[in-house]
Image (cartoon, rainbow, N blue to C red):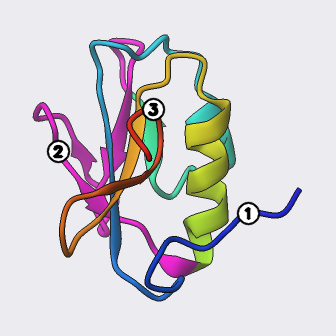
Amino acid sequence: MQHEAPAGGAEEALEVWIDQDLCTGDGICAQYAPEVFELDIDGLAYVKSADDELLQEAGATTPVPLPLLQDVVDSAKECPGDCIHVRRVRDRVEVYGPDAE
């Protein structure tokens, strides 16, 4: 299955965040991109910082590394809770996830 690059080109800076209120704890995201997502002891998924630290504050974002973009996009598309949001850093427009245009 082919995926389109976000407007502006694939090299554009993207960030990802998880809405824990909608997270079902299935862990699909952590299976696709364990470098970016992790399940915590509360059973919910969170994003991780570039230095592998779990970011538990509500709305915490982390940059999407370009080599992992497809894994992060697949995570957002397969998430049963529709809680993974990928947006451009430049204008905070969601490009993948439940609020993507």
Write down the quadrant of residue 40 in the picture.
Answer: top left
Q: Is residue 18 above or below residue 3?
A: above
The amino acid on which the numbered mark 1 sits, given as a three-letter code, is His
Find disc 1 in the rendering and name its residue: 3
Residue at the image point whose x is 45% and y is 54% from the top: 36
> Is 61 colored magenta in this rendering?
yes
Cα–Cα span, label 2 and label 3: 17 Å
Measure how far apart labels 1 and 2 are at the Cα level.
26 Å
Main SS category, magenta section: loop
Residue 18 in view here = yes
Q: Locate residue 97, reporting x and y percent.
A: 47, 40
Q: Nearer the viewer, mark 2 or mark 3?
A: 3
As drawn, which residue projects farthest toward the right?
1
Of labels 2 and 3, earlier in sequence is: 2
Name the mark on residue 60. Answer: 2
The residue stretch that appears in magenta: 40-66
SS at circle 3: loop
- List the residue tagged with mark 3: 98
**How many discs appear?**
3
Q: Nearer the viewer, residue 42 or 97?
A: 97
Badge 1 density bin: few <14, some 14–19, many ≥20, Cα 10 Å:
few
Residue shown at 59%/53% (left/top)?
73
Tags 3 and 1 in contact by the CB under 8 Å rule? Answer: no
Which residue lies at the image location 23% right of the left edge and 70% below the top edge? Answer: 89
Going from N to C along the chain, the mark reached first, 3 or 1, is 1
Q: Amino acid at mark 3?
A: Pro
Mark closest to the chain's N terminus, 1 or 2? 1
